[in-house]
Image: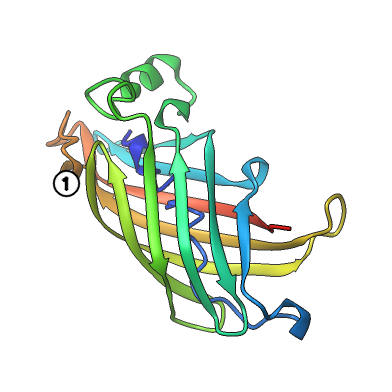
Amino acid sequence: MSNRIGSVRASLFAAALVAAPIAAPSSALAAPQTFDLDPAHTTIAFWVDHIGYARTLGWFTEVSGSFVYDSEAQTVSDIVITVNPASVFSNDQARDEHVRNADFLDVQEYPEIVFTAAGGEPTGENTGVIPGELTLLGETRPLEVAVTLNKDAPYPFGHQKRTLGLSAEATIMRSEYGMDYALGGLVGDEVTVLIEVEAIARD
């Protein structure tokens, strides 16, 4: 229920998210480009253990962000992913209202979750790691996001701009951000953040 996680709006952002992907499909795409997250095709979700029975899944419906990607050098930089914690959704209204209050995300006091990173490191042909910082509940701590580049190509319809498809994952311990409500068996401490992103090249 640590929806805040998401700032890993890891954002998290996704976002956040492009570590060192594969080479550009053509020399015309070699120059570094700024990409903006497509909010209609970006998901920052999380799951957390609930009393050992099952993991509760939720996500944030309001996410924004951008980054710079250089496919020739296989580098990413200037990553900023922002999540609105009040947009948390877990398919249960009462639970979502609880998650928004001071026991968890405290959205009145902390209206944004933010992930930032200066760069990333390749770990394979289309995978990488982005070491950055997550700000949640007023606490800023290191967060490492593992990223896979799924696709780099012009969109096949609509805007037809160069688009990156990315999948990413990170793990946080909510207690490190002061979110200690119901620790000790009721709600897990470890929160897994799952990020799926389509990012569009800026004109």
Q: Which residue, given by chain and number where applicable, does mark 1 sit on?
A: 176
The crowding category of the residue bearing disc 1, from other C-alpha atoms within 10 Å (few below 14, some 14 to 19, many at least 20), is: few
Answer whether residue 117 is visible to the viewer in this image.
Answer: yes
Q: Horizontally, is 125 left or right of 9 in the view?
A: right
Residue 74 % position (x, y):
55, 81
Q: In what element is the residue under mark 1?
A: helix
x 49%, y 45%: residue: 44
Quadrant where the C terminus lies?
bottom right
Observer-nearest of 187 and 120: 120
x 64%, y 61%: residue: 165
Q: Is residue 29 above or below residue 179?
A: below
Residue 3 location, quadrant: top left
x 58%, y 61%: residue: 166
Q: Horizontally, is 37 left or right of 29 in the view?
A: left
Residue 6 % position (x, y):
40, 43
Q: Residue furthest front?
A: 203
Residue 9 % position (x, y):
45, 44
Observer-nearest of 82 and 53: 82
How many marks are shown on the rendered structure?
Answer: 1
Q: Horizontally, is 95 left or right of 198 in the view?
A: left
Observer-nearest of 121 and 32: 32
Q: Amino acid at mark 1?
A: Glu
Q: Is residue 56 above or below residue 67?
A: above
x 53%, y 68%: residue: 148
Observer-nearest of 173 and 80: 80
Q: Residue furthest right?
A: 157
Answer whether residue 11 is visible to the viewer in this image.
Answer: no
Residue 104 % position (x, y):
26, 28
Quadrant where the N terminus lies?
top left
User: Which colour scheme appears in the figure?
Assistant: rainbow
Q: Residue furthest left?
A: 184
